[in-house]
C-alpha cells in the first residue's frame, strides 16, 4: 500500500482547515488489509441510492424535509442517520416514528391515526 504523510493546516480561528500532502513522503508498506477509521461521513451511495438517483444534501446525506421526511422521489421517505447524518439513537427512534406517521398520511389521503409527537426531545451532545 502506498502512503504519504499529511500536514494539517489550521484556519485563523485555530480550527482544522484541511490537510495537504507532504511532498516526497510517499512510500510503500506491506499490507493485506486496510481499515479506514474515518467516522460516519454519509450513507453509502453505491447500490440503492445511486440506482434510485435520489437527491442528496451537501454533506452526502439523503435530502428529505424534516417535517415531511419526503425525499426528492415521490414515494420514498427517509429518516434517521441516512437523512440527518451521524446522530443518536433517540433521534433515529423519534424520526422513525414521525416518518411512519407521514407515510401513513401519504397512504391515507392526508390523515393518520398514529400518535403525534407531543414533546420535543432534548438532546445534549
Ligand atoms: C460505533 C457507533 C457507536 C454509536 N454509539 C452511540 C451511542 O452510544 N449512543 C447513541 O445514541 N448513538 C450511537 N450511535 C449512533 C446510532 O447508532 C445511530 O444514530 C442510529 O443507529 C441510527 O439509526 P438508523 O435507524 O437511522 O440507522 P441504522 O441503525 O444505521 O440502520 C440502518 C439499517 O439499514 C440497513 N441498510 C442499509 N442499506 C440498506 C439497503 N440498501 N437495503 C436494506 N437495508 C439497508 C442497514 O443494514 C441498517 O440495518 C453510534 C453509532 C456508531 C456507528
Image (tube, rainbow, N blue to C red):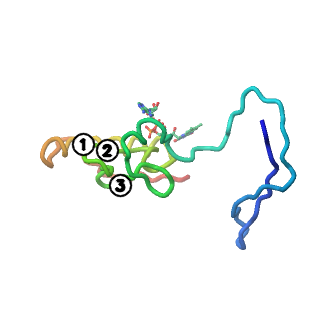
Q: Residue 66 carries which label?
A: 3
Q: Which residue is drawn at 32% across and 52% down?
A: 72
Q: Is residue 82 left or right of residue 41?
A: left
* Residue 83 horizontal/vertical position (percent): 42, 48
* Residue 33 horizontal/vertical position (percent): 72, 28
* In the rendered image, the vertical position of residue 10 relative to residue 110, given as above or below: below
Which mark is in front, 2 or 3?
A: 2
* Residue 52 horizontal/vertical position (percent): 36, 41
- Pointer 1 and pointer 2: residues touching (CB < 8 Å)? yes
Q: Is residue 26 left or right of residue 114?
A: right
Q: Residue furthest left?
A: 109
Q: Residue at x 82, y 50 (%)?
A: 5
The answer to which of 78 and 5 lies nearer the viewer is 5
Q: How crowded is mark 2: few (under 14 residues within 10 Å), some or many (20 or more)?
A: many
The local secondary structure at tag 3 comes to loop
Which residue does the numbered mark 1 point to in the structure image? Answer: 103
Cα gap from disc 1 to disc 2, whole angstroms:
7 Å
Q: Which mark is residue 77?
A: 2
Cα gap from disc 1 to disc 3, whole angstroms:
13 Å
* Residue 57 horizontal/vertical position (percent): 44, 56
Q: Earlier in the sequence, mark 2 or mark 3?
A: 3
Q: How crowded is mark 3: few (under 14 residues within 10 Å), some or many (20 or more)?
A: some
Amino acid at each position: 500500500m502506498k502512503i504519504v504523510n499529511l500536514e494539517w493546516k489550521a484556519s485563523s480561528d485555530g480550527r482544522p482547515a484541511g490537510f495537504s500532502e507532504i511532498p516526497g513522503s510517499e512510500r510503500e508498506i506491506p499490507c493485506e488489509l486496510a481499515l479506514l477509521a474515518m467516522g460516519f461521513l454519509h450513507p453509502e451511495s453505491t447500490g440503492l441510492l445511486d440506482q434510485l438517483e435520489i437527491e442528496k444534501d451537501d454533506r452526502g446525506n439523503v435530502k428529505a424535509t424534516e417535517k415531511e421526511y419526503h425525499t426528492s422521489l415521490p414515494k420514498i421517505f427517509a429518516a434517521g442517520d441516512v437523512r440527518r447524518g451521524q446522530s443518536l439513537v433517540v433521534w433515529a427512534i423519534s424520526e422513525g416514528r414521525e416518518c411512519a406517521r407521514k407515510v401513513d398520511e401519504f397512504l391515507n389521503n392526508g390523515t393518520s391515526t398514529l400518535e403525534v409527537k407531543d414533546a420535543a426531545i432534548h438532546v445534549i451532545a
